[in-house]
Amino acid sequence: MQDYLLSQHFNSKLLDNSTACPAVDNSTACPENATICTGTSCVLPEDTFNQTLNVVLSTVLTIMLALVMFSMGCNVEIKNFLSHIRRPWGILVGFLCQFGIMPLTAFLLSLAFNVLPIQAVVVMIMGCCPGGTASNVVAYWVDGDMDLSISMTTCSTILAMGMMPLCLFIYTKMWIESDAIVLPYDSIGISLVALVVPVSVGVFVNHKWPSKAKIILKVGSIAGAVLIVIIAVVGGILYKGSWVITPKLWIIGTIFPAAGYCLGFFLARLAGLSWSRCRTVSLETGMQNTQLCSTIVQLSFNAEQLELMFTFPLIYSIFQLAFAGIILGAYRLYLKYCVKTNMDVEKTEEKDDSKSISSHTKENGGFVSDEKKVNSLSVSTS
């Protein structure tokens, strides 16, 4: 990605970026690493540090992501996964959110903020992308339905090969020719393989060695949380030179993921899904595959156009992670205080019942039924 931008800027501004050299006969007046030196000007080679860093980090992060998805697969049971495939009500709701709500939301936000046509297109591309793998990690931490989460991510990635061209054709006609957008089917295929293969291995491990799978899952869930933070930091470092962008895109990048989370949750609840599945659908809707969006953008537009909208996928990624963190924090606080308080109230009521039984017996010496004796004994032992 950064390689492409650097080469584009280098080729388009070759003459403008020339460095003045002394007009002397000695050729050593130019820097030793100059690639062109004619007359009074010389051109230095482009700095490849970010290119090398990008390749190294991409390789490391891909390996880490595969390991994390392997651990997430250790929480998937074959029976439950196949039940979602045979009765795909949850998957259908997720499909409607992914390729119905998100593209429509992107279209409405672009119109509401009246952004430039090229900027509206990048917002639409983001809205048409399938769900990202980070949603699987967060779904685990909020006690979501992991079988549904992974099946939704897999299905949305497969269906994206047909739904992305269709949605882009419908919504971007007023801004640009849909043929101008290059869809990297190879990248979609690689994302699919990187998801399916490690998850399948994890499912097999969970089936054969469930006790070991639990240990792998705990380690992988922590590694997944760390990986999400690393990706956000690395993105900020690699593309720190692209942060000059219109405030409208910043606002859209803030509202868009929040709208995806909220609309996905309410639609899932409206469809009658359980609370855990509502949380899962919400995360799968709001967390998009921002890496795929960046790839499409850099393949479809020139350097001048990229300056207007290249950073939007990164902005969306940052805020989708920020809101996911807020959701996770709110859920953990709910478990810690609300659920604990309800359990304490239930235990207090049970103790009060046992005390009333014993006091009645002492005062009246009356008969206590066997059922009450059993209940009283179970309360006292607990």
Image (tube, helix red, strand yellow):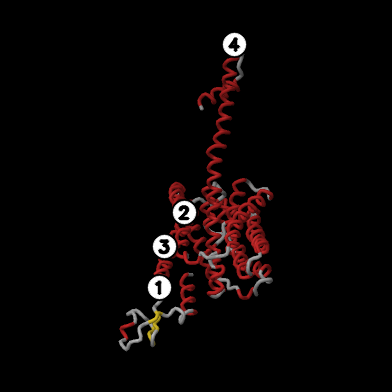
Question: How far separated are the C-alphas under marks 3 and 1?
Answer: 22 Å
- Residue 142, label in figure: none
Other-residue count near label 3 (Cα within 10 Å), few / some / many at <14 / 14–19 / ≥20: few
Q: Which callout, 1 or 4, points to the residue nearer the camera?
A: 1
Q: Amino acid at mark 1?
A: Asp
Q: Which residue is mark 1?
A: 47
- 181 over 153 or under it: above or below: below
Considering only order in the chain, which callout, 2 or 4, is on the residue closer to the N terminus? 2
Q: Which residue is mark 3?
A: 60
Judge left or right: residue 364 versus residue 141.
right
Q: Amino acid at mark 2?
A: Gly
Residue 16 locus on image (x, y percent): 46, 80
Q: Amino acid at mark 3?
A: Val
Q: Which residue is mark 2?
A: 224
Q: At 61% across and 12% down in the image, what residue appears?
A: 366
- The residue nearer to you, when weighing 322 against 158, is 322
Other-residue count near label 2 (Cα within 10 Å), few / some / many at <14 / 14–19 / ≥20: many
SS of the residue under disc 2: helix
